[in-house]
Image (cartoon, rainbow, N blue to C red):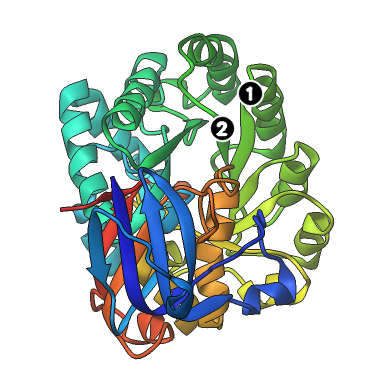
Amino acid sequence: MSILITNIKQLLQARATNVLKVTGSDMKKLPLIENAYLLIEHDTIVEYGEMKDMGDTVAETVIDATGKIVMPAWCDSHTHLVYAGNREQEFVDRINGLSYEDIANRGGGILNSAENLAKATEDELYDQAVSRLKAVMEMGTGAIEIKSGYGLTTETELKMLRVIKRIKQDFNVFVKATFLGAHAVPKAFKDDKTAYVDEIINTMLPKIEQEQLAHYIDVFCEKGYFSLDDTERILQAGVKHGLTPKIHVNQFNAFGGVALGVKYNALSVDHLEVMNPEDIAALKGSNTMPVALPSCSYFLSIPYTPARAIIDAGLPLALATDYNPGSTPSGNMNFVVSTACIKMKMTPEEAINAATINGAYAMGISNMYGSITRGKKANVIITKTIPSYNYLPYAFGDNHIDKVIINGSLLS
Ligand code: NIG
Ligand code: FE
């Protein structure tokens, strides 16, 4: 199977050298080739360059991309795509004046989703997740991280992770699984959070390792959820079971979660709506990717991650959706990229870097995904006819995607 894309108006993120992330002022640079071609064989990018250098290259399928832009598919490094039902009533309750915190305090929020998930069979959960996954693939997502965390019992957390494993086997989109048992304290443990943390450490983690169900360990490190001490215990245990930390921090309060993540060499620290200078300082010189989730800020009307302060401090930044029923019922990376430009003052180049190569880094796959580089997996978006790449974030809310190729296969 080979695909040749010709007459590409702009081939974005074409990098001859396999960079693993882009950082600070380099994020403003988006390498591109005008009037380009791209050759895919099987699931791999084998060649690309200017049309004038294409020679007599042939392929089974030829796509004429005159007037169109070709770029790497989005790498969505933070989702909770596996969940049951929805929380539209809480959405209306928030419009009528309740806060996200009020809703959680009365037993709603994550615990509401946990109740729905407990009632759903594994097949029902799978079917719901698959329909969301297919929709986000159509919107250009070619690699995705998916978390557990709406189970909150050993049995239901494993059920979620097994659904993620099935998705991984059944789809050619690249999937990484994260164990987020510490997403909220379940009702049964409401007066004994330590016992729940013990359950995560002593019962859930060994089973997850045994069945090889996750790559990453996540914790919602936040007031009213899990403290720094809880987070540290869980990260230590996760690491012992072979998992890499990748954590929720600084969504509502900044109290040292970023530095803790860095201490445990977290692959990423995500949310960061509230950032102190100490948090930025902690990230400097680390391998930890800060990840912003602008759709969550949009939906909950909370502050946006201070992208300018982060990037201008010389740090990298990735963008992801946070697709989940409570704070972000959308898996649309195109909206994320637009919102990052409009609300976080990221340039289109920065936002595209953040949603491709840096997103790939935040899920540990930037050696294989996130740029147009020879030998990398053929995950690409072909846009409709648009004037330039600036138009993608500019004309927000419209679908600019014509075709998506995932691991060398054209989505039909
Ligand atoms: O990343 N903040 C914690 N977890 C999710 C939201 C969970 C929910 O409300 O269901 C998030 O925003
Ligand atoms: Fe999240």
Position of residue 19 relative to residue 28, above or below, is above
Image-based side of 99 in relation to 241, left or right: left
Q: Give the amino acid at mark 2.
A: Tyr
Position of residue 216 relative to residue 375, above or below, is above
Which of the 4 image quadrants contains residue 284?
bottom right
Residue 251 in sight here: no
Image-based side of 114 in relation to 55, left or right: left
Q: Nearer the viewer, mark 2 or mark 1?
A: 2
What SS does tag 2 mark?
A: strand
> What residue sits 53% from the left and 60% below the top?
371
The residue under label 1 is 238
> What residue sits 25% from the left and 63% below the top?
62
The residue under label 2 is 216
Task: Report if the CB atoms under discs 2 and 1 are less than 8 Å apart.
Answer: no
Q: Residue 308: where, in percent of width, then height?
A: 66, 78
Which of the 4 image quadrants contains residue 4?
bottom left
Q: Residue 73: where, in percent of width, then height?
A: 40, 59
Q: Give the amino acid at mark 1.
A: Gly
Give neighbour class at mark 2: few <14, some 14-19, many 20+ (Cα, 10 Å): many
Q: Residue 97: where, in percent of width, then height?
A: 31, 67
Q: Residue 99: where, in percent of width, then height?
A: 39, 60
